[in-house]
Amino acid sequence: AGLLTKVGVYALYRFFTLIFTADVGFTHEVLKWVAVFTMLSGVLGAAAQFEFRRILSFHIISQIGYMILGLALYTPLAVAGGVFYLAHHIIVKANLFFISGATYHLRGSHDLSRLGGLWKTHPWLGVLFLIPALSLAGVPPLSGFWAKFIVIKAGVALDEWLVVAAALLTGLLTLYSMMKIWMEVFWKATPPETAELRGVRPPAAMTMVIVALSVLTVLIGVIAEPVWQLAAAAADQLLDPRAYIEAVLPESAQ
């Protein structure tokens, strides 16, 4: 969920900066509306779900829309924003799935209707959920804020107001979905049928990974410059792929 779902995004970035470059006006216009449809369909699908992992899975779709949008806008700022978004999302999405696993250990279900009361019994897990959840929605000062800000700023610079509106709406609906999980899993009282189940403490290794990824999410948000510099350098290489071509096909440089 965290890493392998980005392989297709990487392939798109490579193909549309190396191969499909003859008619950028056409191909990237198609990509732009594919990105908008991906964002909205994914986030609406997430809003309709009532199962922890399904909500997170639909949000993979919507967040990939932001990454494709960075490629579609095809400016150095937009491509760098897409790369930044990709790196941020790997960390945040992996963490959210780890947290869903931790709640399963504690309550024995992924169904939100059967969950509840974890804020009272495990407040530390509630805090660790809020960090990636709010980051996914783009709340400052977490990593997701900068990822969304860069892509949206690139859209504003190109006067792509409909695209910007779709991106902002997706962020708002993402926040709604994350707060739905928070209210159902952590804030509401434990359902009687769930209270009878004996929870199992999550493995220590899982807890350590959740803490580490949450700390990394905060650090990227507070100290975003190093990640931005890497993303900007990657964008420069993507938009000018001569060094990449020479590395892969050295005979082509002769």
Image (cartoon, rainbow, N blue to C red):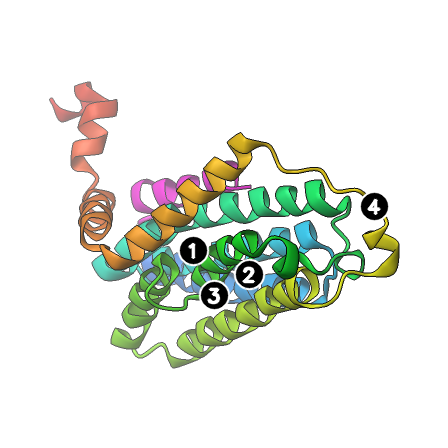
Tell me where residue 50 sits by quadrant: bottom right
Q: Residue 68: which numbered mark, if any? A: 1
Q: Residue at x 75, y 57 (%)?
A: 115
Q: Which residue is mark 4?
A: 197
The mark that comes first in sequence, 3 or 1, is 1
Residue designated by label 2:
38
Question: Which is more N-terminal, label 3 or label 2?
Answer: 2
Q: Secondary structure at mark 4?
A: loop
Q: Amino acid at mark 3?
A: Ala
- Camera sees residue 251: yes
Task: Establish if 83 lies above or below 161.
Answer: above
Marks 2 and 1 close (CB-CB < 8 Å): yes
Nearer to us of marks 3 and 4 is 4
Q: Is residue 180 left or right of residue 196?
A: left
Q: CA distance from mark 1 to mark 4?
A: 43 Å
Does residue 9 appear in this view?
no
Q: Which one is in front, 44 or 217? A: 217
Q: Residue at x 44, y 79 (%)?
A: 165
Q: Earlier in the sequence, mark 2 or mark 1?
A: 2
Q: Residue furthest right?
A: 193
Q: Quadrant of residue 193?
A: bottom right
* Magenta range: 1-21
Query: Quick check: is 59 in the magenta stretch?
Result: no
Structural crowding at the residue carrying mark 1, measured as other residues with C-alpha within 10 Å and reported as few (<14), some (14–19) or many (≥20):
many
Label 1 residue SS:
helix
The reply to whether discs 2 and 4 touch (Cβ–Cβ < 8 Å) is no
Say which label, 3 or 4, has the lower sequence index. Answer: 3
Circle 3 residue? 137
